[in-house]
Amino acid sequence: MFATLSHLARLARAAWTLARHDAIFPAEYQAVFPAPARWLGRFARLIAIRDRAANPGERLARALEALGPAYVKFGQVLATRADVVGAEFARGLARLQDRMAPFGEDEARAILESELGAPVSQLFAALGPSVAAASIAQVHKARTPDGRDVAVKILRPGIERRIARDIAALRLGARLAEGLFPQSRRMEPRAFVETVARSLVLELDLRLEAASASELSEAALAAENLHIPEVDWARTAKRVMTLQWVDAIALTDMDALDAAGIDRIKLARDLTDAFLSTALERGVFHADMHAGNLFVGRDGRLWAVDFGIMGRLGMEERRYLALILNGFLTRDYDGAAEAHFQAGYVPERHTRADFASALRAVAEPIFGKSASEVAMSRVLLQLFEITDLFDMRLQPQLVLLQKTMVQAEGVCRLLSQDHNMWEASGPAVTRFMRRELGPEGKARDILRDLDALRATVIALPATLERLTEAAERLKAEPPETGARRAWGRMLLLAAAALTGGAAGAALYAAIAL
């Protein structure tokens, strides 16, 4: 009971903080709000801070910083969507990506020595001040005794307790949303919060992030242009991670990119290809691709940092994703609709033809157009309306993928309004389709099925032995009712039919081959 009241108080504090910063119903957007929201906005501004920032995005950023890292993550996604929230609003939110206030250098040194078990002077020949600070950790540039420049990431003091409180409050908020607004259940708010919570908890162990960096560096081999810094495992622990220093320009600094002569259109294509290639080819992707985590070297090479949130897809999910994307790329809306139904994303009570028509209505107006020609806010609104019309529920396993796709496409728009997502997506999807769904992929499917059948046949004697023992026990027990004997026989027959069916399938496959 006390915990629930405490979480309710945190939710109330969140509303109060947003109101204090005029970030809940900003004055600049009064004209587009319905009447109840306008009245609430006017009431909220009675308690708003005086002399607040003129940019509504900056006001929201300051409110989210005050609320904590879980809220900051939400703001980072919005910061990549200037086409949805407006360019000025996005610029105000940009401070959330890598320009938060750092914690003290003495605290950083104390954490280093505690985690790595040695004096800082022994670990590093030089340790500079913080060069970037985010919601969960900050980064220092350092030099190892053997002369290598490295980036040292250190978790913020007390961040674990703060995130635990944030997650608990968000869980309560999700339950309240489902109870008070039943229509929200289709969006699976509790499942969404659990997905975000899991990713945040994993971010609190930098050894896991280091492992993710290593894994993504292997997956990046499938991409045309994506590079991952090398991990210094000797200087990595739970609250400290050390990586190769990358001398590159952040994608948040467009002026520096232009001054260095970076081809922004090519960079946007590289980013799209890198995201889709790692996701489709290897089933792993960087799931926090905001501009503050992406850099480009003077040679034009794309680098990614901050691997606290990683997305993973199983083979079936990757295949459905490829089929859906390929349907859009080739304008095969029937094929894209079929993939949605096969994956279970659309309930069977709806017709494929109707859903294909809805996909066509979304895709045709934007097909082949550049970012400057597409109002993504309208597209997202239309997609939301379609998910409602066809009773599509949020897929928890795809939350990180959907969030990252929104982020990556938003960064590409920042890089170039001439970015064509259709052209950029084509090569990665085509490569995957050719390999996994062509003759080579079908041959691998047959081999996987044979392995599964072989395992079933090997397990068959033990299964039959267990069934025989179960039958003997049933015979030995005094039957209480005829119904019990009947149910026992039915279960045995069902089990025998299943195992027999598996054995028969294995025999058929062996004969056929």
Image: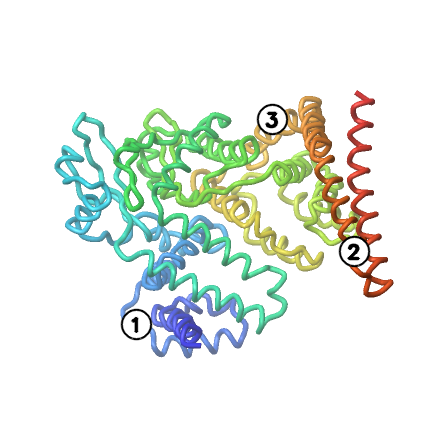
As shown in the figure, which amino acid type bears the numbered disc 1? Ile
Label 2 Cα crowd, 10 Å radius (few <14 / some 14-19 / many 20+): few
Dot 3: within a 10 Å radius of its alpha carbon, few (fewer than 14), some, or many (20 or more) residues? some
Question: Which numbered disc, 1 or 3, marks the residue closer to the eye?
Answer: 3
- Lower sequence index among marks 1 and 3: 1
Q: Is residue 47 above or below residue 259?
A: below
- Residue underneath mark 3: 431
Q: Left or right: where does residue 215 sit relative to residue 241?
A: right
Picture quarter containing residue 340?
Answer: top right
Residue at position x 46%, y 64% from top?
Answer: 170
Residue 305 is situated, as x and y percent measured from the top left of the image, at 36, 38
Q: Is residue 345 above or below residue 45?
A: above
Q: On the image, numbered disc 2 is attached to which residue? A: 349
Q: Residue at x 86, y 57 (%)?
A: 486
96 lies above or below 223: below
- Please state which amino acid type lies under the numbered disc 3: Arg
Which mark is first along the chain, 1 or 2? 1
Question: Considering the numbered disc 1 on the image, is that residue within a helix, a strand or a loop?
Answer: loop
Asked if marks 2 and 1 touch (Cβ < 8 Å), the reply is: no
> Which kind of residue does numbered mark 2 sit on?
Arg
Query: Helix, strand or loop at disc 3?
Result: helix
Residue found at x 47% / y 25%: 221
Residue 476 visible? The answer is yes
Q: Quadrant of residue 230?
A: top left
